[in-house]
Amino acid sequence: DIVMTQSPDSLAVSLGERATINCKSSQSVLYTSNNNNYLAWYQQKPGQPPKLLIYWASTRESGVPDRFSGSGSGTDFTLTISSLQAADVAVYYCQQYYSTPHTFGQGTKLEIK
Amino acid sequence: QVQLQESGPGLVKPSQTLSLTCTVSGGSISSGTYYWTWIRQSAGNKMEWIGRIYSSGRTNHNPSLKSRVTMSVDPSKNQFSLKLTSVTAADTAIYYCAREDNRWVLNPWGQGTLVTVSS
């Protein structure tokens, strides 16, 4: 199985400041034949199911604010929130869909400082 | 807009079988090239991919659950189902169903259902 490791486990950021969450996979999730990284980011607010934010490591889902961005390739990935809003308080997960079982990171809890 | 809804018992006794159904609305379970997926979230927010089923019945499941998992699809009811046998307290979790779309990502998700394993 591909192991996904996020850092940090929790993060407190001031409103309007940048938040950065990292995700590392135990093996590459880059499919070289199409140059796509099979990596997604999800946001989960309390009492709700996860919501898709980013796929192919850097493509924003329709309707997701452009303050959210994804980057990285191979085994190292980053989710960045450029200017934190109160609505962004949530747990964020990365997930690889390169090979089954599709595995998730342990989650990063984002709070307001 | 496709929506998914999980249903099933909220309490299961140890050693028994957990059975859940996911009802799909707003679209046919047989249309498109989608996998229908089960995920669970246990204490500490640990997310675990359980497995997926195609409308044809082809499945992939997580080897960590060994042979305890059975998934099925019923196109006539627009539903797919999960059975997990020989449950223990470690199977206590919120169980989600989701559609794996043609980008291979999970979207949308059901609201989730809490299943507690306890005598």
Image: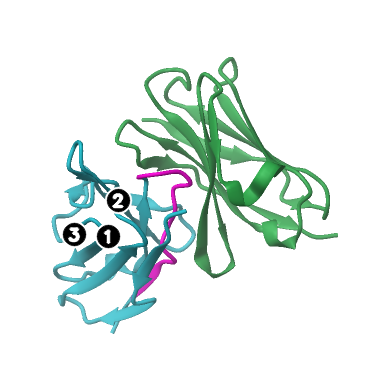
Chain colours: A cyan, B green
> Which residue corresponds to the image point at 45% horizontal and 43% vertical from the top-left?
A100
- Residue B66 among those drawn in magenta: no
Check disc 2: other Cα within 10 Å, few if <14, some if 14-19, many if 20+: many
Residue at the (17%, 58%) spot, across then down: A69
Residue designated by label 3: A72
Which numbered dot is residue B96? none
Q: Main secondary structure of the magenta part?
A: loop
Quarter of the image where one finds residue B104: top left
First along the sequence among labels 1 and 2: 2
**Amino acid type indicated by mark 2:** Val
Q: Is residue B118 left or right of residue B26?
A: right
Residue drawn at (18%, 59%) of the image? A72
Kindly check if marks 3 and 1 are in contact, taking CB atoms under 8 A apart as contact.
no
Residue A102 is a magenta residue: yes
Q: Position of residue A90 (x, y in %)?
A: 36, 66
Q: Residue at (54%, 41%) from the top-left corner?
A: B51
Chain of the residue that carries numbered disc 1 in the rendered image: A
Amino acid type, callout 1: Thr
Q: Which residues are magenta?
A: A98-110
The residue labelled by disc 2 is A29
The answer to which image quadrant residue B83 occupies is top right
Q: Secondary structure at mark 2?
A: loop
Which image quarter holds the C terminus of chain A? bottom left
Name the residue beneath numbered marker 1. Answer: A75
Question: How crowded is the residue under tag 1: few (<14 C-alpha within 10 Å), some, or many (20+)?
Answer: some
Q: Nearer the viewer, residue A31 or A53?
A: A31
| Same subunit: marks 3 and 1 | yes
